[in-house]
Amino acid sequence: MKGLEESSGDGATTDELFAGALVEVATDDDEGAVPLLVALHGRPTREVFDRAARLLAREDPVERELGARVLRELGPYDDEGRRPFTTETIAVVIAEMGDEPDPWVLGWMISVLGYHCAHQALDLVLDHRGHPAQPVRFAVAAALPALADPDHTERRVVETLLRLAEDENEDVRWYAAYALFNETAGVGDEQRRLWAGHLIARADAQRGEELAHIATTLDDDADPTLRALLAEGGSRGFRSTAVGAVAGSGGSEGEVAAVAGLEGMDL
């Protein structure tokens, strides 16, 4: 087994890959290589799918995690953004999510739904936005862009991302803020400025710096006023910066009031 764990899994049987990938998952620290798990992703057969799906119902949470992580990336995307077993994967994950007691495994299940663009599971995922465990909230923030309407992001998605962009956990905040300013659709520049003003006006120094970092991720053709607003959020008085940037860009009195007072914000 040691030799297999150190290889890419080429030529290994499916039994060997599952056994080795289970060891990888049990010892994974989010930074180590998982070549045998990756090898399973490259083997999108009925046998691999069925075994991974059955793992979701096992007693051992490590086995359930392995099942979710295999299903998440099993096979390549086609031209329509679907993987070989997308329909069945979504169905089995939704069926098992309600009974999943382990927050870490639940987070991976939510991630599966995101990777398979399970738009029909949007509200199921949103139900976990206030989960007490960080891995679950992180998974929600990361999955929402793939679950939302690709043409016009739903209001309830925006509300959730705004909420998670103020999460107590830095990683959750980052994914939510990135999604707000880079992955929402059908939203105008003025609306994004209001979101930025809302977050900056409530930010402490650390969170202001995080928002300034978000400014560096915007596309080259992004609204320059939004970019400046986010960038300045990490460098000086947050509330005055938010109000000044919106007012200076020609924002209406109502927009400035919304940023300054955080009232009546139209999401």
Image (tube, rainbow, N blue to C red):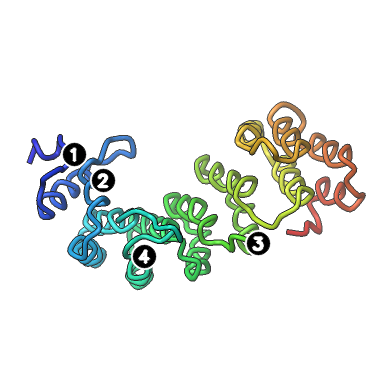
Compare marks 1 and 3 and give the one earlier in the sequence. 1
Apparent side of residue 253 relative to residue 137 in the rendered image (left or right): right
Q: Secondary structure at mark 3?
A: loop
The residue positioned 65% from the left and 46% from the top of the image is: 181
Disc 3 + disc 2, Cβ < 8 Å: no
> 10 Å neighbourhood of mark 1: few (<14), some, or many (≥20)?
some
Q: Secondary structure at mark 1?
A: loop
Tell me where residue 207 appears, x and y as whole percent: 62, 36
Compare marks 1 and 4 and give the one earlier in the sequence. 1
The type of residue carrying mark 3 is: His
Disc 2: which residue: 38
Q: Quadrant of the N terminus?
A: top left
Q: Is residue 145 above or below residue 97?
A: above
Tell me where residue 183 appears, x and y as whole percent: 60, 50
Compare marks 3 and 4 and give the one earlier in the sequence. 4
> 10 Å neighbourhood of mark 3: few (<14), some, or many (≥20)?
few
Disc 3: which residue: 152
Tell me where residue 29 appears, x and y as whole percent: 30, 38
